[in-house]
Image (cartoon, rainbow, N blue to C red):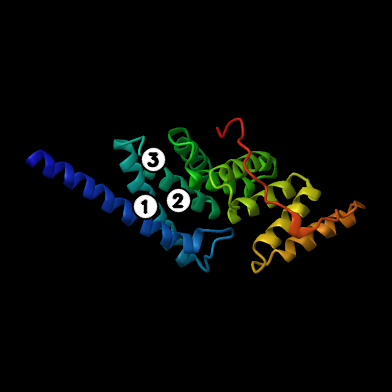
Amino acid sequence: MKAFYWAFLLIFTASSLANTIDTDLQELEKTLGSYPPAIENEAQQKEITKKYELLKKKLDSLLKSDPKNESALYQRGLLQTFGHNMDYPDSWRGADEDLKNVLRLNPSNVRAILDLANLYVNSDPTLAPAAENLYKSAQCFLDPAPDEEAQRGLFFAYYYQGKVPLAYKQALILKNSWPENGYDKLIDMTASVLKRNNEITPNYQADKLVHTSCEKPDSTT
């Protein structure tokens, strides 16, 4: 009976800790979820950095005792994508490593696939091909319905590779699938680039276009 009690207590404690960490991550995401981060002054920078470091230490400690904890690995990877947005030292490498380790444990973790793709596409144009593969891989687990985050990410992956006609087509798909979400600006942007490059703007029937579907990459590592 005592063994059952302690096992239950450990499960309950781990679940409670995971929920607390999720709450802390959601709070940090409000400020650090995009680049540039929504930090208005030095005092806020210090406060956010302190919260970031405390949460990182908590996750480091948890993973030291349980290095294959998929949930904690994902949480630390996500946290470090936030760190990258505020240029915290070594956060890009840490996020890349943790999210890849999540995918080694569970290749179908769509959230980790998308966060790794977002890290790549928002970091360096040379990583756009890897991001493209990851967005297509994520869509594999989400077909037949198009996923807005994956489809939007593909637009930027194409654009940063200089695949402007493909990016233009993807912008039309986004507009057709989610007409209220402001994708006209992406259509205008890519059409402008095509015109500047003296390239013909493809004449697609937008309502006939189908979202980019499942395409598994050779590797996500």
Q: From this viewpoint, which residue is outermost toward the right? A: 198
Q: Is residue 176 left or right of residue 52?
A: right
Secondary structure, mark 2, is helix
User: Residue 141, position in %: x, y?
Assistant: 53, 43
**Could you tell me the amino acid type at mark 2?**
Leu
Residue where numbered disc 1 is placed: 55
Secondary structure, mark 3, is helix
* Pick the front one: 1 or 15: 1
Identify which residue is drawn at 17% across, 41% down.
Answer: 7
User: Residue 90, position in %: x, y?
Assistant: 50, 43
Identify the mark at residue 79; answer none if there is no mark: 2
Cβ–Cβ under 8 Å for marks 2 and 1: yes
Residue where numbered disc 3 is placed: 70
Q: Earlier in the sequence, mark 3 or mark 1?
A: 1
Q: CA distance from mark 2 to mark 1?
A: 8 Å
**Could you tell me the amino acid type at mark 3?**
Glu
Identify the mark at residue 34; answer none if there is no mark: none
